[in-house]
Structures are given as C-alpha cells and as structure tokens.
C-alpha cells in the first residue's frame, strides 16, 4: 500500500521516495531547502536552482506550506542538514495542495485558542506537542488492554442505546428510537454485571459513555471514554488491586514506548510509574484530613459528597494516587453492596489522582432480594430494570468492578489543564462538530 520511505528511515547512499507535508521552505538564493514532515519526523530536500531541472525546482518552490509532496531522489550525508541527511531530488510531485492561508499555524509559532484548535483539529494535531498527546493516549490504552489480558479478562462490547440510566448524579441524553423511549448509555454498568453471571467471569470494556452533565468544566465531557472492569468472585479489595494494576500498566506502556513523545512534551525527566500499593484511606479519615486542612468553609460531615475544593485539598495532602473506601451507603448507587457488618457503610470506593477522581467502583449487590429493595430505596422502579434484575435469579456470583475515565487518566498523566486536550473531538455543551 505504502512503498515510500519514512523520513527517519532514509539511508545515505540509497534512493528513496518520501511523502509528507511541506513543513517549511527555506530559500537562500542559489540554493533552497524544503523540509518535509511525515509521521516519523522530518527530512531536508535540497534544491540547487542552477543545477536541477527548472520545472521540478519551480514545483517545489511554488508549493504552499502544509501541502503534501512526494519526492524521489538520492539520500546523501549532509552534516549541515537538521537530521544529517538530505534528499537530492529527481522528481517532486504535489500530491495534495494546501491553500496559502491556513486557519491555524501547525508550526505552533502563532498561538491559537482552544476553540480554533478544536475547529481545525486536523491541522492542530500536526503540532508535535498535540500529536504526542494522542500517541501517548494510544500507548496508554494499549497498556491497559495488555494488562487486562494479563488479568485473564475478556474484552466485551455492550450497547450504547439503552432503555434505562444507571448513574443518578447526571442526566440522560434521550434518543429517538422508533416508537420507544431510549437513551445514550451513561455507563456499561448493568451490562458488564449481566456478563458476570454468563461464565465469562472477568470482563472489560473500553467504550464511550454519554452524560448530559449540566456544566462546562475542565474535567467533564458529555461524551467520554470509560475503561470498565468487572470480575466474578471478587470483593472491593480485589477490584482495587486490579485498578492499580491497570493504571500502572498504562503508565508502564507509556514509559516504555513513548520516550520521544514525553520528550516533546517536556515530561521525559519527571515521568514516573506510580508506585504499587496506593494508600487506601476511609471516607471518614478523608473527612478528618480535609477538615484539618481548613480548605473548605463548612466542616464536612458523614454523608457529604466531596466537593472539588475538598478533593483538591485531600489530594494535596496525600500527594499520590490513593483510594477512598467505606463511603456512606446513602451516597453510593443502588448496585453497590453495603458492608455486611454495617449497612450504613458501603463497599464502594473511588480512586483518586491528587488532582481529581479517576475511578469509581465497589463490590456489587448480587442478591436478588436486596437488589430489588435497593431500587425501591433510591426511588427507582424495579420493573423498568427487569432485564437486569431477573438475571440475578439464575446464579449470579459475588462480584466487583470499577470504571475509569480514559480522558482523565491521560489528562492527569500528562498534567493537561483541560480534559478537552485529551480527546480528539470533544463533546461539550457548545460543541457538536467536528
Ligand atoms: P554548497 O556549496 O553545498 O551549494 P554553499 O555554501 O555554496 O553550499 P549557499 O547558497 O552559499 O551554498 O548556502 C547558503 C547557506 O546554506 C550557507 O549558510 C550554507 O552553510 C547552508 N547550506 C548549504 N548547503 C546546505 C545543506 N545541504 N544543508 C544545510 N545547509 C546548507
Ligand atoms: P462514575 O460515574 O464515577 O462511575 O464514572 C467512572 C469514571 O468515569 C469518568 N467520568 C467522566 N469523565 C469525563 N467526563 C464525564 N462526564 C465523566 N463521567 C465519568 C471519571 C469517573 O471516575 N458505573 C460506575 C463505575 C463502576 O462502579 O464500575 C460509574 O460509571 O473518571
């Protein structure tokens, strides 16, 4: 399909065909240089005006920056060239011309606001620092998948058009589904649980979730990517162990395969894989520590959710990834199991980065009667969830799992200010295209 030579593979003494974007033209009079860029890097093409075919030189010099060119010629050593080699062309072809005026400068010399960048994402990702984020995101997800396989998990894909919501705190997006009421799924929660009784036992999914979040914030998307895990015969502690393995697996893959990208982002020196054994602190201890920092106006009490400033104060205090366990049952969803020794305390947990929450999870309520009761307590109609609850009557083992936001993982890994930096085409209240 592609018999060109990548810029960084071009070997002196060989002939090569290079194809890529015209990064820059430097015309010095008698001699001019085209700098071509492809996914591997850049290479210089030398144009000697008096010695080369006039039409070819003209084609090269007339091409507008960011046009796609294909150049064939001899690769030669040239110590003054940026990469130590250059192409002495025999032919230059414009494969796809670029307009002279670009809506965004891919060289990054001219700053562009986030909206302009997102409107022109194709050009934006040509910037090395932006491309690096998405190369790293890809490597992190590869690490996540490999780690799930090490944990003996089966990858599943569950529906995104569904009949009911699951995550109470956020609104649903309705969709028109023939004559029925339907929604975009907020979480694969119920479906991954249904597969626990299927004999697959350990499953994971990496897929989109849709949430009609009320506010535009730097940490929420209306369409996000959820990394979900669910395992039979597991409790909350087992699920936390798996969570740590997966998060560390993502970091390890990035450390191993993305040295150049981390360098581009100025992160190579400080990038470390989080140490195993993330501290596990109880919700009660979390409240005490937050209250002790004095960072929140009102003293937090049992049953309060942790506000953003509260999370930030605690994160600063702990200073590494950590779990918050033993949440009050009343603020965890119906599918989370209460502790056997105290029903007011749940087995739910969150995994936090010092900046923000990355994961929610817990052991699940697998006993049919208790599950149905839980629906009633949360004011939900159990009948609407029959497709889910009924399967708990036919052999549903104890199980536990969690959901991890992929964009939040990347955002915290790379210290990005805004979650939109970690997704190619973010969906927020204002943004529906591209
Ligand atoms: P040559 O004899 O190789 O054509 P030159 O010095 O006569 O080189 P000039 O047009 O005077 O050609 O070069 C202008 C500038 O370009 C000089 O600063 C020179 O160092 C630089 N230069 C020349 N050839 C290359 C090359 N292949 N790669 C990078 N820089 C070069
Ligand atoms: P929760 O609702 O806490 O739990 O979501 C899990 C994780 O998904 C990410 N996330 C988001 N990221 C960006 N934008 C959003 N709008 C958004 N919403 C969620 C966060 C969050 O920690 N069913 C449970 C998981 C489980 O128990 O298995 C759930 O969805 O990183």
Image (spheres, rainbow, N blue to C red):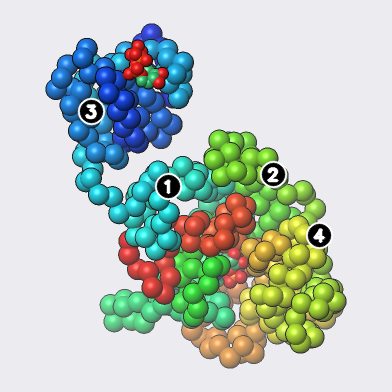
Q: In x, y percent, where is residue 37? A: 37, 33
Q: Secondary structure at mark 4?
A: loop
Within-10-Å neighbours for mark 3: few <14, some 14–19, many 20+: many
Residue 3 is at least partly visible in this image: no
Point out the quarter of the image occupied by ligand 2: bottom right
The numbered mark at residue 108 is: 1
Residue 290 is at least partly visible in this image: yes
Q: Nearer the viewer, mark 4 or mark 3?
A: 3
Measured Cα–Cα span from mark 3 to mark 2: 42 Å
Q: Is residue 367 above or below residue 125?
A: below
Q: Quadrant of residue 398?
A: bottom right
Residue furthest out toward the left: 55
The numbered mark at residue 279 is: 4
Nearer the N terminus, badge 4 or badge 3?
A: 3
Measured Cα–Cα span from mark 4 to mark 3: 59 Å
Task: Say whether residue 368 is left or right of residue 429.
Answer: right
Quadrant location, the N terminus: top left
The structure residue drawn at horizontal position 65% and vertical position 66%, both measured from the top left corner, is 357
Q: CB atoms at circles 1 and 3 under 8 Å apart?
A: no
Residue furthest out toward the top: 13
Q: Nearer the viewer, mark 4 or mark 2?
A: 2
* Circle 2 residue: 270
Measured Cα–Cα span from mark 1 to mark 3: 23 Å
Q: Secondary structure at mark 1?
A: loop
Measured Cα–Cα span from mark 4 to mark 2: 21 Å
How many numbered discs sit on the rendered protein? 4
Nearer the N terminus, badge 4 or badge 1?
A: 1
């Amino acid at each position: 399909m592609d018999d060109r030579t990548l810029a960084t593979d071009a070997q002196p003494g060989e002939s090569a065909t290079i194809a890529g974007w015209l990064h820059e033209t430097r015309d010095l009079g008698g001699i001019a240089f085209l700098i071509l860029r492809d996914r591997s890097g850049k290479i210089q093409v030398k144009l000697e005006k008096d010695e080369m075919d006039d039409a070819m030189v003209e084609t090269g010099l007339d091409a507008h920056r960011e046009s796609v060119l294909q150049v064939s010629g001899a690769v030669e050593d040239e110590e003054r060239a940026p990469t130590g080699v250059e192409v002495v062309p025999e032919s230059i072809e414009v494969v796809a011309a670029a307009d002279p005026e670009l809506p965004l400068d891919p060289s990054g010399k001219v700053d562009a606001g986030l909206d302009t960048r997102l409107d022109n994402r194709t050009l934006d990702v040509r910037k090395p620092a932006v491309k690096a984020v998405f190369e790293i995101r890809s490597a992190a997800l590869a690490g996540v998948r490999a780690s799930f396989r090490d944990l003996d998990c089966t990858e599943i894909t569950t529906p995104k058009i569904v009949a009911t919501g699951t995550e109470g705190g956020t609104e649903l997006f309705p969709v028109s589904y023939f004559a029925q009421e339907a929604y975009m799924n907020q979480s694969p929660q119920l479906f991954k649980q249904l597969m626990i009784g299927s004999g697959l036992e350990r499953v994971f999914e990496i897929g989109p979730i849709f949430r009609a979040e009320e506010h535009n914030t730097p940490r929420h998307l209306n369409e996000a990517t959820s990394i979900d895990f669910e395992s039979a015969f597991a409790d909350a502690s087992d699920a936390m162990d798996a969570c740590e393995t997966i998060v560390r697996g993502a970091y390890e893959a990035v450390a191993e395969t993305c040295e150049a990208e981390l360098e581009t982002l100025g992160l190579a020196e400080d990038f470390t894989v989080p140490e195993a054994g993330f501290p596990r602190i109880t919700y009660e201890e979390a409240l005490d520590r937050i209250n002790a920092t004095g960072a929140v106006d009102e003293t937090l009490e049992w049953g309060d959710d942790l506000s953003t400033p509260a999370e930030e104060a605690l994160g600063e205090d702990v200073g590494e990834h950590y779990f918050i366990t033993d949440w009050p049952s009343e603020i965890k969803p119906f599918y989370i199991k209460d502790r056997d020794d105290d029903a007011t305390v749940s087995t739910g947990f969150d995994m936090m980065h010092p900046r923000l929450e990355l994961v929610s999870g817990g052991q699940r309520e697998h006993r049919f009667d208790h599950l149905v009761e839980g629906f009633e307590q949360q004011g939900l109609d159990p009948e609407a969830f029959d497709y889910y609850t009924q399967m708990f009557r036919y052999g549903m083992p104890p199980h536990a799992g969690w959901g991890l936001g992929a964009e939040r993982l990347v955002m915290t890994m790379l210290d990005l200010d805004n979650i939109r930096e970690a997704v190619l085409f973010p969906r927020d209240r204002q943004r529906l295209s591209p």
